[in-house]
């Protein structure tokens, strides 16, 4: 039943009475589980929502390479270094599938990149934190990629075909990423007391920002209700965050590490963990550009883009030359 008025406190969702005949037909297809494809008719707001979410997701993958890139030259062994390099390359690939998925909605890659480089576009808050030790590579794989999987598995079933299909491969690769992170955490936790302390310190710093990745609480999430109606979101921010906590606490126990939350406790009645209040002020500051690394991340991206200009120009010049040759032949 799609015709319910859902009041999120912040934004109302369209009811069937507000919809045109085309919109009603579109919503009925979504309710029947039919995938929407690029050339299908879609409401403008659906298109805009997808461009917003998919492009933010693509930017997150690209900017997400930077915190880990910091450790490629300092990985403790050649094996760890090649695994980390492969993971970072995967993230670039995810960015590219996602930019391609966004382009199917009629926006150009140049427009999307302009929005990122000018600071207009958002990317995940998590990548505005520094990577201070090798253990952070473990914590990112375990917690950040772990959270990404929880958020993205449902996206494989979302209503927009090109996005849902891109997510299938992304999720397979993310699960390798999460395992490599947990493997680093296991090695450190079983290592010397200093190594175990490094692992604990990384968990202490990455725990809360990882919970923030799922977005504001349901009560404060402006986009959720409409995205749920369009089956872009199949679970709410809070539901997925809870899933992350429930899945991760036993993993931390196995490592012999302590989750940095004094309010964390098993709730027998609900069959899941209660956890402490997230510092939403910190989250909003990071979104506003005031996180510990926002400025550095953006500066690095813009510099990489500017430094690569000669290469992009060379590719275009080469393609033009080939085309001219073919035309002459
Ligand atoms: N950071 O109404 P809400 C990765 C924004 S990549 C920044 O709940 P929505 C990885 C939100 O955009 C991980 N901004 O929004 C890569 C909205 O602002 P606008 C990236 C956030 O869209 C490399 C406002 O807050 N994953 O894992 O319904 C290496 C209100 O929020 C954040 C994705 O992008 C945040 N954390 O739900 C390793 C997944 N949270 O746009 C790992 C796809 C919220 O209205 N995206 N905002 O100005 C989603 O699932 C949804 O967009 C979100 C937010 C759950 C993130």
Image: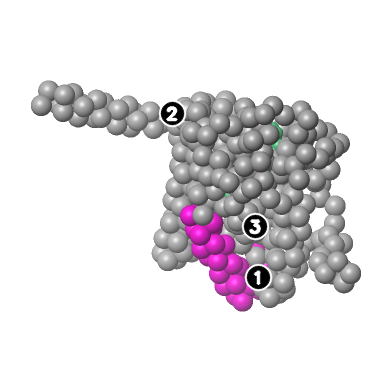
Q: Which residue is mark 1?
A: 196
Q: Which residue is mark 3?
A: 150
Residue 65 on image: x %, y %: 51, 47
| Residue under the point 69% across and 53% down | 210
| Residue under the point 54% across and 56% down | 171
Residues at circles 2 and 3 in contact by the CB criterion of under 8 Å: no
Which mark, by number, is residue 273? none
Q: Nearer the viewer, residue 239 or 118?
A: 239
| Residue under the point 76% across and 45% down | 1
Image quadrant where residue 281 sits: top right
Q: Nearer the viewer, residue 22 or 322?
A: 22
Query: Counting other residues with Cα less than 10 Å from the Cα at mark 1, is it few (<14), some (14-19), or many (20 or more)?
Result: many
Q: Secondary structure at mark 3?
A: helix
Which is closer to the viewer, label 3 or label 1? 3
Query: Counting other residues with Cα less than 10 Å from the Cα at mark 2, is it few (<14), some (14-19), or many (20 or more)?
Result: few
Image quadrant where residue 261 sits: bottom right
User: For the magenta stretch, what is the residue range?
Assistant: 169-198
Asked whether the viewer can see residue 151, the reply is: yes
- Regarding ligand 1, which quadrant of the image does it lie in? top right
Image quadrant where residue 292 sits: top right
Q: Which residue is mark 2?
A: 306
Q: Nearer the viewer, residue 310 or 214?
A: 214
Quadrant location of the C terminus?
Answer: top left
Sequence-first tag of 2 and 3:
3
Which is closer to the viewer, label 2 or label 1? 2
Sequence-first tag of 2 and 1:
1
Residue 10 on image: x %, y %: 83, 33
Secondary structure, magenta segment, majority class: helix
Q: CA distance from mark 2 to mark 3?
A: 35 Å
* Residue 191 highlighted magenta (yes or no): yes
| Residue under the point 80% across and 45% down | 218
Q: CA distance from mark 2 to mark 1?
A: 41 Å
């Amino acid at each position: 039943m799609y015709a319910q008025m859902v009041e999120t406190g912040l934004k109302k969702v369209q009811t069937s009475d507000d919809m045109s005949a085309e919109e009603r037909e579109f919503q009925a297809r979504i309710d029947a589980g039919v995938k929407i494809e690029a050339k299908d008719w879609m409401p403008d707001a659906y298109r805009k929502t997808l461009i917003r979410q998919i492009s933010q997701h693509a930017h997150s993958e690209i900017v997400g390479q930077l915190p880990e890139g910091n450790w490629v030259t300092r990985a403790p062994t050649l094996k760890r270094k090649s695994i980390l390099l492969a993971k970072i390359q995967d993230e670039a690939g995810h960015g590219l599938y996602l930019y391609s998925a966004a382009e199917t909605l009629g926006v150009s890659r140049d427009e999307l990149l302009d929005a990122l480089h000018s600071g207009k576009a958002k990317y995940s808050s998590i990548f505005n934190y520094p990577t201070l030790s090798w253990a952070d590579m473990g914590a990112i794989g375990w917690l950040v990629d772990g959270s990404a999987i929880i958020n993205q598995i449902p996206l494989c079933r979302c209503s927009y075909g090109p996005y849902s299909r891109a997510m299938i491969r992304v999720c397979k690769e993310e699960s390798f990423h999460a395992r490599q992170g947990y493997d680093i955490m296991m090695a450190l936790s079983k290592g010397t007391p200093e190594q175990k302390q490094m692992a604990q310190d990384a968990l202490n710093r990455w725990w809360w920002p990882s919970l923030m990745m799922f977005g504001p609480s349901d009560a404060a999430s402006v986009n959720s209700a409409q995205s749920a109606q369009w089956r872009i979101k199949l679970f709410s921010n809070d539901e997925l965050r809870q899933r992350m906590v429930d899945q991760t606490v036993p993993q931390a126990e196995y490592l012999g590490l302590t989750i940095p939350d004094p309010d964390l406790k098993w709730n027998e009645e609900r069959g899941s963990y209660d956890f402490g209040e997230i510092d939403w002020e910190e989250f909003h500051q990071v979104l506003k550009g005031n996180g510990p690394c926002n400025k550095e991340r953006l500066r690095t991206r813009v510099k990489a883009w500017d430094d690569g200009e000669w290469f992009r120009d060379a590719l275009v010049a080469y393609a033009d030359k080939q085309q001219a040759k073919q035309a002459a032949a």
